Amino acid sequence: MKLKSIEKKIDNNRVRIIGTIEVETLCKEIEIYFEYPKRFADCLSEDADAFVPALLLPAMEMGESLEIEPPISEKLFRNTRKIQDIFCQWHPENFKQILVFARNVVKRKLPNRSHVGAFFSLGVDSFYTFHKHIHPNNPLLPKISHLIHMKGIEFPLSYYKDDREQEVNQRIEEVARATNIDVVFGETNIRSHFPLKWGLYYHGAALASVALSLSGGFNSVLLPSTDSYKKIFHWGSSPLIDHLWSTENTELVHDGSEVERAEKTAKFLTQNALAMKYLRVCLKNYGGAGNCGKCTKCVRTMLPLEISGKLSMFQTFPNSLPKNWDKILEIKDEHDLAHAEAILDLAREAGAETQIVKTLSRKIETAKCAIFLQEQTFGQLIGSMTSVMLVQPIQRQGDWLQEKLKVNRFKAKAGRLQRRIELMFNGEEELNYPPSSDRVT
Ligand SMILES: [Zn+2]
């Protein structure tokens, strides 16, 4: 794979940087772009940095070396090795170590980079990061100057067919206006070329690409965390990886892992009037605003709100949980399990309605068994069943036998002692004691 060139184009009110890439496996050239309103033209960098996260994982998946012609940050270039190490350890079946060649490695600081950006989608994680950084109790944290929202990140561009993102953009603008923050609305086709699993592999790298495309003006960019430090999953955006995409110009910060998502929802978003008005988590809306209130992601968010007694204050959700919420809530892998357990902890801590605690506990126990069975190979499963059905009963019999033998050994010793005493009292000498036939083995 070869990043051949980068071009900056300004048309009417938009500015775009386009990378041209030769992909051997696909036998063709492709173009990846990042586009923004023209007023951000000075923020756009024509270095290779923005395209490196976008290309490294696809190249590793295809097993192609990565050749980079335009200048690349020395810091980022060095870290491509460590990023590869992590992904290869996490997913050895999908990624291979590859060679990264760079024609021009540079270590330079661009002037005038004063902006602090935060990715913002109106979701739980991004609202938490937003709330934390604008809250007056946190004067030491950098103040966010720009929210960043990209069309083509949440879903591939082909999903946006009816301008449904307009309402989302409007709401983001209202949040920004209310807090005197600017917004960068951009667009990218980064999801249009490589069908990598989004959550598991690619979304952290894609966000890093967007952040680095703005490195001419942004000193740092916050990537709202998905998980907490309690359990670090092998996930595309992670506290182990995100900062490794940083350059000398733009620091990437994985933000918010100090709190579980259920806690973010129940303890922090319930203090934020804008979150109460605009919180948006539903993926059934495919990039649109609002929430259906009936899907697993909606229920997972509504539960902590219900536990905190604040659900009815959140305008984008129904006032109560659906009656069959326990059937809707999916716990299909370790990731879902961690989220469900965090909700249960929260419910217990808050002394929430016993029914929620009971139902959730039962659901979690059932899910744990199902996940255990899912993770077993057929051989391991047969092994486990054999163990339960055959080996363990035999072991139990063995333990019983051993106990029995111990008793018998004790009885035999006692018997021999008794016999010896009898012989002594009778004045008879025992010549061969103990007789071999008496030995208990
Ligand atoms: Zn929903």
Image (tube, helix red, strand yellow):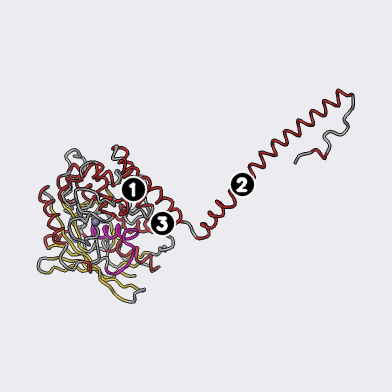
Ligand 1, image quadrant it occupies: bottom left
Q: Nearer the viewer, residue 369 or 19?
A: 369
Ligand 1 near label 2 (Cβ, under 8 Å)? no
Tell me the crowding category of disc 3: few under 14, some 14 to 19, or many 20 or more residues within 10 angstroms, Cα based. Answer: some
Q: Are marks 3 and 2 in contact (CB under 8 Å)?
A: no
State the residue at coordinates (25%, 59%).
Answer: 283
Q: Which residue is mark 3?
A: 90
Q: Tag 1: residue type?
A: Ala
The answer for how far apart the CA atoms under marks 3 and 1 are is: 23 Å
Q: Quadrant of the image for the C terminus?
A: top right
User: Considering only vertical position in the picture, is 321 above or below 42?
Assistant: above
The answer for how far apart the CA atoms under marks 3 and 2 are is: 37 Å
Q: Which residue is mark 2?
A: 395
Span colored in magenta: 192-212
Horizontal side, residue 67 vs residue 281: left or right = right
* Percent position of residue 103, x then y: 32, 66
Badge 3 element = helix
* Percent position of residue 153, x then y: 24, 61
Q: Which residue is mark 1?
A: 340
Q: Is residue 251 visible?
A: no
Q: Residue furthest right?
A: 428
Residue 197 is inside the magenta segment = yes
- Report how many numbered discs are placed on residues in the image: 3
The mark lying in front, picked from 3 and 2, is 2
Q: Earlier in the sequence, mark 1 or mark 2?
A: 1
State the residue at coordinates (22%, 62%).
Answer: 286
